[in-house]
Amino acid sequence: MISQKMLPFLQNNSAIRAMFEEGKEMAKKYGRENVYDFSLGNPSVPAPEEVNQAIRDVLDEEDSLFVHGYMSNSGYEDVRADIAASLNRRFGTAYAAKNLIMTVGAASALNIILKSILDPGDEVITFAPFFVEYGNYVRNYDGKLVVLPPASADFQPDLAGLAKAVTPKTKAVIINTPNNPTGVIYSAESLRGMGDVLREKEREFGTDILIISDEPYRELAYDGCSVPWVPDFYENTVVCYSYSKSLSLPGERIGYALIPDSVSDSEDLIQVATIANRVNGSVNAPSLIQRVIRRCLAVKVNVAAYDRNRNDLYNGLTKLGFTCVRPQGAFYLWVKSPDEDEKKFVAACKEEHILVVPGSSFFGPGYVRIAYCVSNDMIHRSMPAFAKVAEKYGL
Ligand code: PLP
């Protein structure tokens, strides 16, 4: 019954389920307060009250048939126009409603763009470590994901590696900044360099290469760091955005794909991506939450709560002797494994009831990812357990 293409998912899925079940078993055995689960990237800060109020207001103030009805496959025109205006204010751009397609989160935005551009055997480049679903999304359209290993300890993109990896079959480069799992924000210098490399390769091969900028963590940036606007550096850039983290709404499934006019064949791409939104079965992004987003464009989650977790975890673990990449954004800490095999380190953490994800799950062996979208209290309670692991490794 099951397709050959989907069979491997059954196996992987059971591995993930096993990890989830293990966490639950541990909580039952040792008590919830004695298990420190840093494995999931689920927001721990609730959606701002303005979002809940906007849901009530939409229901009270807008026409019910309109709010719950079908609309254009790209989403409500006024929602897209207001998002475009908000981007224009922030980034000095000139986008219009037509440049936006509302989607079922960033996941769907990535999928409609990939569906729109990939033919079987086409290549998509990304930089390790990366959000592992990229491989699945590219495979959905029979493309090939080409993974570049990190070239430096700061986890900025490897531009020399990129120049070597681009071939006439390269259709796109997926980047993610602020990054899951490293917390790194790509610098303006890196993005300028990336634009130069890709423009040069487009000339050399006579092809178009798209940067797909996956940005669910754009609003989660710390220490006054700004997240450079990627289309400023390269004309052929599409942005895949999500409100899952910026408004703590991951279950509502809302985001968008932005296709600027500067992208090659932009009008066709906008049309095809809109059709992709329909034929992949989404049809359109959920209607009620689109109406809500329109009223919340200036609202943000309490980023200070994540910032406090970031500082407490980073300071706590470095004090214990662990080597960590200081995160500038998102809500993940990327920690160097003191064991050559990070899976052994993950097991040593588990012995102290700490659950973290091995870096190899993100194509980043030798590291682990600690998601600090948890209660601040848990971070402090977990420190004695981390201290025992540090002691085990003689840090
Ligand atoms: N991209 C990255 C890097 C992510 O970490 C996630 C979710 O965690 C997604 C995309 C998918 O986000 P969404 O909920 O908007 O589909």
Image (spheres, helix red, strand yellow):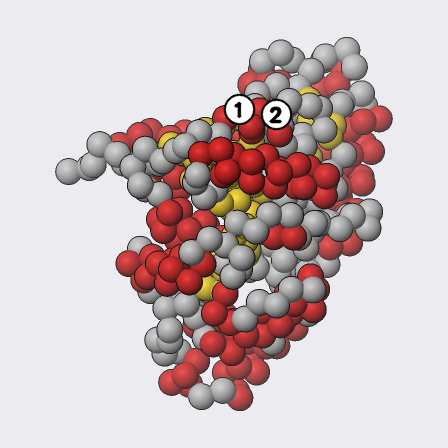
Query: Label 1: which residue?
Result: 164
Disc 2 within 8 angstroms of ligand 1 (CB): no
Front residue (pair 334, 274): 274
Tell me the residue at 32%/33% (across/down): 121
Circle 1: is it few (<14), some (14-19), or many (20+) Cα within 10 Å?
few
Query: Which amino acid type is shown beneath numbered disc 2?
Result: Ala
Q: Secondary structure at mark 2?
A: helix
Front residue (pair 100, 332): 100
Front residue (pair 218, 244): 218
Task: Locate residue 373, reporting x and y percent.
Answer: 65, 46
Question: Mark 2 and mark 1 in contact (Cβ < 8 Å)?
Answer: yes
Regarding residue 155, the answer to whether it shows in the image is yes
Q: Where 115 falls versus 132 (above or below)?
A: below
Tell me the residue at 65%/67% (across/down): 88
Tell me the residue at 72%/13% (across/down): 392
Task: Locate residue 284, reporting x and y percent.
Answer: 38, 66
Regarding residue 270, the answer to whether it shows in the image is no
For residue 395, the mark is: none
Query: Label 2: which residue?
Result: 160
Tell me the residue at 57%/24% (across/down): 161
Residue 17 in which image quadrant:
top left
